[in-house]
Amino acid sequence: MMEIQSNIEYQDWLKALKEKVSVARVKAALAANKELIHFYFDLGRMITEQQSKAAWGDKLLNQLSKDLSAEFPDLKGFSITNLKYCKQFYQFYQSEISQQTVDQLTAFDFGQHIVDQLPWGHNVLIFTKSKSKAEAEFALRDINKPMGMSEFKLTEIVPEDLKSSLPTIEEIEQTLKTSSHE
């Protein structure tokens, strides 16, 4: 009787099974990211609405951060800074991105928009550094295309009026370091 580990048919089957596990893990991570982005958008909306109708001001964020962190100690993302980012995320997409995008975000139909496919840190970088609708849309326009273009070539295709508003490599690295520690 042949050992199962050395059987070619078993090895092929095992390889296919491992690929399925890998694909399932990626799909699960993408789905979790999408839900997190939707949650942060909704949380930003809720904070914005609560602050507009209550006289608590920034005290709301301090208390909310304490309460949510105490209730969910194993979850990250409830720091005062991140709560401010959630509010800014909501407000940015409500006021700066096209009405079609706002409708999608409000209805939680993010699936057709790239923001729910990006990790939170990348979203934070885009909405904190973009000063206008044009900048954000430019940043998101070709996000799914493969990377690898040299910085020189990239700067050649960036419209002149946007070049001065783009962050430097150092600013991007610092923002990513800061947001990854949140």
Image: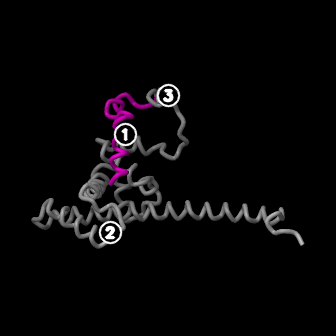
From the image, tell me which residue sits under label 3.
153
From the image, tell me which residue sits under label 1.
172
State the extent of the magenta-drawn residues as a range: 157-182
- Secondary structure beneath disc 1? helix
- Secondary structure beneath disc 3? helix
- Secondary structure beneath disc 2? loop
Q: Nearer the viewer, residue 44 or 2?
A: 2
Residue 148: in magenta span: no
Q: Position of residue 59 (x, y in %)?
A: 14, 62
Image vertical order of residue 129 relative to residue 94, above or below: above
Which mark is nearer the camera, 2 or 3? 2
Report the residue at 42% width, 63% height from top: 109
On screen, residue 49 versus residue 178, left or right, reads left
Which numbered disc, 1 or 2, marks the residue that appears first in the sequence? 2
Which numbered disc, 2 or 3, marks the residue that appears first in the sequence? 2
Give the label on residue 73, or none: 2
Q: Quadrant of the C terminus?
A: bottom left
Image vertical order of residue 160 relative to residue 11, above or below: above
Q: Nearer the viewer, residue 151 or 101?
A: 151
- Pointer 1 with pointer 2, Cβ within 8 A: no
